[in-house]
Image: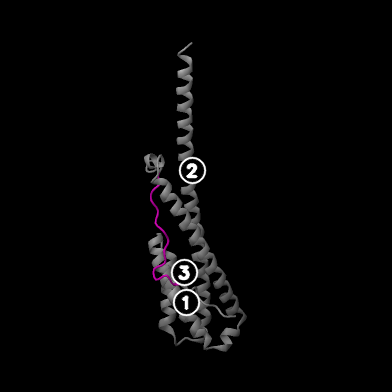
């Protein structure tokens, strides 16, 4: 009977360690899924902004067709942003989109009829809202990446993160930082 107490202690300790490892694995996988979901949300917001930017380009082109280089540059930046699949590529493309949308609004200021158009005002307002959503989604994604990268390098997750398919993630940083320091100014 003296051997029963040490066996029970060993079994309880083994069960506790097993539960701890299981909880660690589960939380790492859940966090990885949350980062995937955040990236999907961010991608959807970027696609929405690309649609709105395309509508803006059509409106501005109708009034300022002579600004062909600016309009073509903005269209190319929006297309590159939509094609970007990795956070690094998306960050670079997003910086370009930010830099090309600002001059478009400056051109629009020279056309009072365009600025008073209900369609232009709707697109402008929707773009401002979408920019806010993109920034919020980017912060949420980067927070999840920070948490995931920290967790996967800590014990015990470090032992099994790779086997679970949880790799280090890239942050979504804008190249040029224009959206962080000064979002596109929209005047109504």
User: Which residue is at a point 59% across and 79% down the rendered structure image?
Assistant: 121
| Marks 1/3: CA–CA distance | 15 Å
User: Which residue is at a point 41% across and 50% down the rendered structure image?
Assistant: 149
User: Which residue is at a point 43% across and 46% down the rendered structure image?
Assistant: 151
Q: How many marks?
A: 3
Instruction: From the image, give the main secondary structure of the stretch colored magenta.
Output: loop
**Of marks 1 and 3, the one in the foreground:** 3
Q: Is residue 188 left or right of residue 81?
A: right
Residue 71 is situated, as x and y percent measured from the top left of the image, at: 44, 80
| Mark 3, other Cα within 10 Å: few <14 / some 14–19 / many ≥20 | few
User: Is residue 177 shown in magenta?
Assistant: yes
- Front-most of residues 57 and 107: 107
| Marks 2/1: CA–CA distance | 40 Å
Disc 1, SS: helix
Residue 57 is situated, as x and y percent measured from the top left of the image, at: 49, 78
Q: Which mark is residue 27?
A: 2
Q: Which mark is residue 180?
A: 3
Quadrant housing residue 145: bottom left
Q: Are marks 1 and 3 in contact (CB under 8 Å)?
A: no
Q: Are marks 2 and 3 in contact (CB under 8 Å)?
A: no
Q: Which residues are magenta?
A: 165-178
Disc 2, SS: helix
Disc 3, SS: helix
Q: Which mark is residue 101?
A: 1
Can residue 97 be spotted in the picture? yes
| Mark 2, other Cα within 10 Å: few <14 / some 14–19 / many ≥20 | some
From this viewpoint, which residue is outermost toward the right?
A: 118
Q: Which mark is residue 23?
A: none
């Amino acid at each position: 009977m003296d051997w029963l107490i040490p066996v029970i202690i060993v079994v309880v300790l083994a069960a506790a360690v097993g539960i701890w490892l299981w909880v660690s694995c589960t939380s790492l996988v859940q966090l990885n899924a949350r980062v995937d979901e955040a990236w999907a949300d961010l991608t959807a917001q970027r696609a929405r902004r690309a649609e709105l930017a395309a509508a803006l380009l059509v409106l501005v082109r109708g009034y300022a067709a002579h600004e062909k280089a600016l309009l073509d540059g903005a269209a190319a930046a929006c297309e590159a942003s939509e094609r970007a699949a990795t956070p690094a590529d998306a960050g670079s493309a997003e910086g370009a989109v930010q830099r090309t949308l600002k001059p478009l609004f400056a051109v629009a200021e020279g056309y009072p009829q365009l600025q008073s158009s209900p369609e232009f005002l709707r697109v402008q307002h929707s773009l401002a809202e979408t920019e806010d959503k993109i920034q919020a989604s980017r912060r949420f994604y980067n927070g999840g990446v920070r948490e995931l990268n920290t967790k996967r390098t800590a014990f015990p997750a470090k032992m099994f993160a790779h086997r679970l398919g949880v790799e280090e993630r890239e942050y979504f940083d804008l190249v040029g930082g224009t959206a962080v320091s000064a979002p596109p100014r929209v005047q109504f």
